[in-house]
Amino acid sequence: MKFDEKPTAYLTRAQAYAEALVDIGEPMKEKDLVLLVIKGLRDDYNDLKTTILTRQFPTSFSELHGLLSDHDYMVHKTLPEVSLVQAFSVVTSQPLSATSNHSLSGHLPSQCSNRDPSTIRGQRQNPTTNYANFNDIRDRVRDLLGRLTLQEKVRLLVNNAAAVPRLGIQGYEWWSEALHGVSDVGPGTRFLPTFLGATQFPQVITTASTFNDTLWEEIGQVVSNEARAMYNGGKAGLTFWSPNVNIFRDPRWGRGQETPGEDPTLAARYAVRYVKGLQGNVGDRLKVAACCKHYTAYDLDNWNGVDRFHFNAKVSKQDLEDTYNVPFKACVLEGKVASVMCSYNQVNGKPTCADPNLLKNTIRGDWRLNGYIVSDCDSVGVMYTNQHYTATPEDAAAQSIKAGLDLDCGPHLAVYTLGAIKQGKLKEADVDGALSNTIAVQMRLGMFDGPRQPYANLKISDVCLMSSNQLALEAARQGIVLLDNRGHGPPLSTLRHRIVAVIGPNSDVTVTMIGNYAGIACGYTTPLQGIARYVKTIHQAGCSDVSCRGSQLIGHAEGAAQQADATVLVMGLDQSIEAEARDRANILLPGHQQELISRVAKSSRGPCVLVIMSGGPVDITFAKRDPRITTIIWAGYPGQSGGTAIADILFGTTNPGGRLPMTWYPQEYLAKVPMTNMGMRADPTHNYPGRTYRFYKGPVVYPFGHGLSYTTFRHSIAQAPTTLSVPMLSIHLENNNATTLTNGLRVSHTKCSSLSTGLHINVENTGTMDGTHTVMVFSSPPEGKWATNKQLVGFQKVHVVAGGLQRVALDLHVCKHLSVVDSYGIRRVPMGEHTLHIGDLKHSLAIIPTIEDIKY
């Protein structure tokens, strides 16, 4: 073969070589095949079959390089067409890996030959080269876009991106989920028959109640290990649309269980740590690509005739800035998340997926997202078919892409983008802009790097490790919340309570414990099984399921309680009551559950413990008031090992330390707060009480942050500032000093980066049992214009032995933690005396402005 032939001649010859391989039909090891086809550069076609049959080809890449002169290599390197190895996929209509003894076909997506050591640009790779370098990736992206036709580009704009066989690019399914473990909810992930399961951690609302950010990142690391292993095994993608960081604004929301709770500081911290755990920390490389969803002000699914597809969330600039957008901003700026998902709903009359201010200006502009923006599934179609926001489907395609959307979960962009371009509503350059963001993420994941893709060593043996199962158990132990306890320690004893009646519709459940957006668990331990490891049990369900529509089985439950030394009632909800597209009408226990609890408690001859399994809060005021119920525990949805964790807490093997990440309201609260009212702040003129602990001041069943222990703790402040000076330039004075003091100083008008201080708190265990304690620091602004409830500004979990003392150090950032947002959506630092709240302690901190003149 002469090296002065035109590029098209190289492609023709490559196709002939590939055809020869097909004729012979002898499968070969991946390295042999790669080397063989590349060696074809030096062989005549007539000699090729002999070369194949006799295996007279290089045995290593170094030998190959010796056969090829520098001139030979440079010619191959600069070919503008596909490489020879890529041509194999073109001719045989199958990925090259299909002939390998370790086939990875079907899950090394959008790569130009998953066995060719070259990049898509045909560049010779060096094992030490960092191909995640941002500039290099952008070069490679531009090169790939230059090879694609417009029709091919359009088919890459959707979640089930089509293959481009002529370039050796396989199809790819972008939609996978990993909310609290690898899930098979999305079509990108399948378990059986290769993988029997994956570690299913507690539902997010339960994990959030640990208030342990180190744990959150550790969970993310395990989930991403298992995700990579499943990818390597051909059963998953690498783009996982998790976590859900929406604010749990209304207790009826069926998806509140997926979130870290109602507080923006807590949700933001969870988002950052979980994303870091998923994505890894190797420069710009990605272990998996996380996605923070659903942006923004999304927390209504289907309530009172209003669904998420038609809902227009009317949100003030103030609430958007200081509540709804806080976790997403942290996701991008601190977590460096690779993706953000826009939501179904409209915000102030515009679909979020077609709002350039929300997408292009904020996420990509202000926050500088290094990644892609994806729609919630069928959101682009919804804005045309359901919301009638656009006159034509082509308008929906054009407006969403021009607003900053890069990927459509759904078929809409694949069907209507070409039409939008033909009608002049969109340009091919707009499509290129979207694809450049998605393809860059794939390259950061190593999808185009062939056998050198990172984390290739992870395999099926790395899934469901004993250490991972232990971490799931530890997460459940730390997340379970002790709500009430009339005694001074664990409610049950193996010596005094040798027979325990275990009663309730959730007492022997498995799948219920892992909540929604879950996968197949490695295994389960139900509450009944967990308790049975300690003592002899008598079991009665009491109801056929959580809906508890009849009372026929209650008598049997009463009989069990009369025979036992103690009774444990495991009650609550499941996905038939609260779930995606299923908001609750009330926050009471379903059906006859209250009757079952009260009758069993009355019949129990020993202590009676109530365990609530749920995602959202439940009004159990009746149980709090029942003196026969000695202990109340909220288990959330505690994951695959939930039964073990519940039993360990009941018998005192584990000292509970979880805290509620959301307020538990009384049922009467709901009559004053339609789910459609997005306002966070109270409005007394309209009898609107406000939402969450930050703005609602009425009665509660249990407050945000509530959680007891079998021991007692005492706080003392070891070190804390009493004053902080905030520098500002005289040019930013608003009319006069008095006005500045009244309005507060804009954070953009001060040197925020240097405005932080330390707070040191001593935590003493004054009881007789070792335990973990969450130090929670709240702040409230100066009284007057900014008067509001306290807000969480920091937290840290610490283990303290009985009689011991630990010192906790927390960083307070003035602009982040001591600021408020005005009615225009502008974040300001109020001047004057702020109050820090640590348990029962209060500490005053004065913020004083200092004026700096402009220096010339």
Image: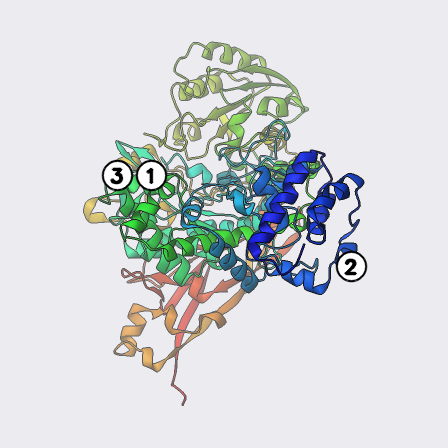
Task: Please name which of the two marks, 2 or 1, marks the residue nearer to the observer.
Answer: 2
Q: Nearer the viewer, residue 619 or 574?
A: 574
Q: Which residue is mark 1?
A: 300
Q: Which amino acid does the dot numbered 2 rest on?
A: Gly
Residue visible at 57% across and 15% down in the picture: 539
User: What is the spatial separation of the Cα atoms under label 3 and label 2, in whole angstroms?
Assistant: 80 Å
Tell me how far mark 3 sits from mark 1, CA to CA. Answer: 17 Å
**Amino acid type, mark 1:** Leu
The CA span between labels 2 and 1 is 65 Å
Q: Label 3 belongs to which residue?
A: 672
Quarter holding the N terminus? bottom right
Give percent across and percent down for residue 819. 39, 63
Helix, strand or loop under label 3? helix
On residue 168, the disc is none
Looking at the image, which is closer to me, 747 or 395? 395
- The image position of residue 239, as x and y in percent, is 52, 45
Mark number displayed over residue 66: 2
> In x, y percent, where is residue 792?
44, 54
Residue type at the position of mark 3: Lys
In front: mark 3 or mark 2?
Answer: 2
Q: Label 2: state its secondary structure.
A: helix
